Amino acid sequence: MTDTAELKLDNGETYELPVITGSAGEKAVDVTSLRGSSKYITLDPGYGNTGSCLSAITFIDGEKGVLRYRGIPIETLAEKASFLETSYLLINGRLPNKTELENFQSEITIHTMLYEDVKSFYDGFPRDAHPMAILASVVCSLSAFYQDEEGSPEEVSYLNSIRLMAKLPTIAAWAYKKSVGHPFVYPNNSLSYCENFLYMMFGLPVEEYEIDPLLVEVLDTLLILHADHEQNCSTSTVRIVRSSMANMFACIASGICALWGSRHGGANQRVIEMLQRIREDGGGTKKFIEMAKDRESGFRLMGFGHRVYKNFDPRALIIKDKCAELLNKLKVSDPLLDIARELQEAALADDYFAERKLYPNVDFYSGIIYRAMGIPVNAFTVMFALGRLPGWIAHAKEYTEDPKNRIGRPRQIYTGPEQAEYVPIEDRG
Ligand code: ACO
C-alpha cells in the first residue's frame, strides 16, 4: 500500500505528497510542502475537507455516529464518569486515579471565587445583556487580574486552566443573577461542581435552597456530552488564537464568542424559540418542514444537520432519553417535547432530510432539559460553554505542547483588482 499521493497540476508537473494515516485508519494528503514546491495552494472554504492538525483528544466517525474522548465511547462516559473526571481525561490524556481526581477536584474548588473587583464589572452591563456577552467579557477580563505570573509557561497555563474551570460556573451564574436583579450568591466550596453551579444560579440569601440530586445528575451528564467535539468552530478558534501565543483567558473568551452563533452553540436557544413559534402558530409541524426545505424562506430546522455527522449524533440520542427521563421524574409535561418529537419524526421521514443526511444534533433536545431545570432560554448557550470548557483547554494545551506548532495563518486566493489607481477625493464621482 502506498503512503504517498501523486498530484498532477496544470503546469505539467507531478508532485508527490505524503499520505498520513490516523489511528482509526482515516487518511489525509499532507499538502504542507505543496506551495513551496509548486506555488499552488489548496482551497477549501469552510474547511469541510481540511485537517488543521493532528490530535489525540477526540475521535468522531460521522458516518457511523461514533464519538470517543481519548478512545472512550461517549455512551460509557455519560453512564459511568463524572464531568470533572471527563475533564481530567480530556486535559491530561488519561483517566485519573482516585487521588489524582481528588486533587483535581480540590484544585478547582479552591479557585471558585472571583476577585471582588470583577463583581463590579457586572454593574456596567445592562439588565438585558445577553449572558454570552457577559461570559466572554468577564472571562477575557480575568487576564487583567492574572498577569506576569511566576513559573514556566506550562505551569502558568495549567494554573489559569484550573482557574477557568473553577470560575466559569461562578461567572455564568452571576450573569443570570444580573438578568433577574437578584443578589449574587458566592460559591460554596463544600458542594460539588454541579451542585455549586445550581446553588449559585438558584440560591437566594433569604431562604434555604435544596439542591435536587436529579438535576445535579442530569447537568453532569449534559456537561460530559458537550465536553469536546474535535475541530469545531469554537475549538478551532481557541487553537488559532492560542497559536498567536495569546493567554488562556483570551483564548477561552474567543471560543465563547465563536460558540455563541446560531450555526454553532447558539442553536440550542434557537431550537426552543423555533418550537415555541411552531406552538404559537398552532398549525402543526408540516408548514415548518416545508419552509426548511425552501432555500428562499431563509428558515432552517434548528437542531438539525451537522458538518460531520451524516447519521444520528450520538449525543442527541443520549440527550433525548435523558430528557424523557427527567420530565418523567419531575412529573413535568412540556408541550415543546411533543412538538420536537413530531418534528423529528416528520423530518426523518422526508426525502429532503434523508438525501442530505440531516439528523437531530446535540442541540435538538438539550434546551427542553434546560427549560425543565429552570434555566432561561438565553442562557442555554452558556450551559454549552460550561461543558465545552475542558475540551477547549485540552486543545489549547495539545497545541502548546506540540513541538512543531506554528501560528495559524491560512492563505487565500485574491479576487480583487490586481492594481488600482488612488483617485484624489475631489476627482471622485
Ligand atoms: N434545515 C434545513 N436544511 C438544512 C439544514 C437544516 N437545519 N442543515 C443543512 N441543510 C441543507 C442545506 O440547505 C444544504 O442543502 P443544499 O445541498 O440543497 O444546498 C445541505 O443541507 C447542506 O447544508 P450545509 O449548510 O452545506 O451544511 P454545513 O455542514 O455547512 O452546515 C450546519 C452544518 C451549520 C450545522 C447546518 O446543518 C445548520 O445550519 N443546522 C442548523 C443549525 C444547528 O442546529 N447548528 C448546531 C450544529 S451542532 C453544534 O454546533 C453544536
Image: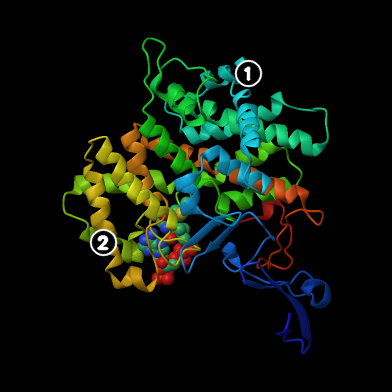
Q: Across the whole image, how many numbered discs are drawn on residues?
A: 2
Which quadrant does ligand 1 occupy? bottom left
The quadrant where residue 149 appears: top right
Image location of residue 171, percent across then percent down: 54, 27
Q: Residue at x 48, y 41 (%)?
A: 223
Q: Residue at x 41, y 19 (%)?
A: 203
Determine whether, in the image, residue 185 is placed left or right of residue 56: left
In space, the residues marked 1 and 2 are separated at their CA atoms by: 49 Å
Q: Quadrant of the N terminus?
A: bottom right
Residue at disc 1, CB closer than 8 Å to ligand 1 = no
Q: Secondary structure at mark 2?
A: helix
Q: Residue at x 40, y 39 (%)?
A: 218
- Position of residue 385 relative to residue 294, above or below, is above
Q: Which residue is mark 1?
A: 115
Q: Secondary structure at mark 1?
A: loop
Q: Which residue is mark 2?
A: 345
The quadrant where residue 375 appears: top left
* Circle 1: residue type: Tyr
Q: Nearer the viewer, residue 377 or 335?
A: 335
Image location of residue 115, percent across then percent down: 63, 18
Q: Nearer the viewer, residue 88 or 45?
A: 88
Image location of residue 350, percent across then percent down: 28, 69
Determine whether, in the image, residue 133 is placed left or right of residue 114: left
Determine whether, in the image, residue 180 is placed left or right of residue 338: right
Q: Nearer the viewer, residue 24 or 404?
A: 24
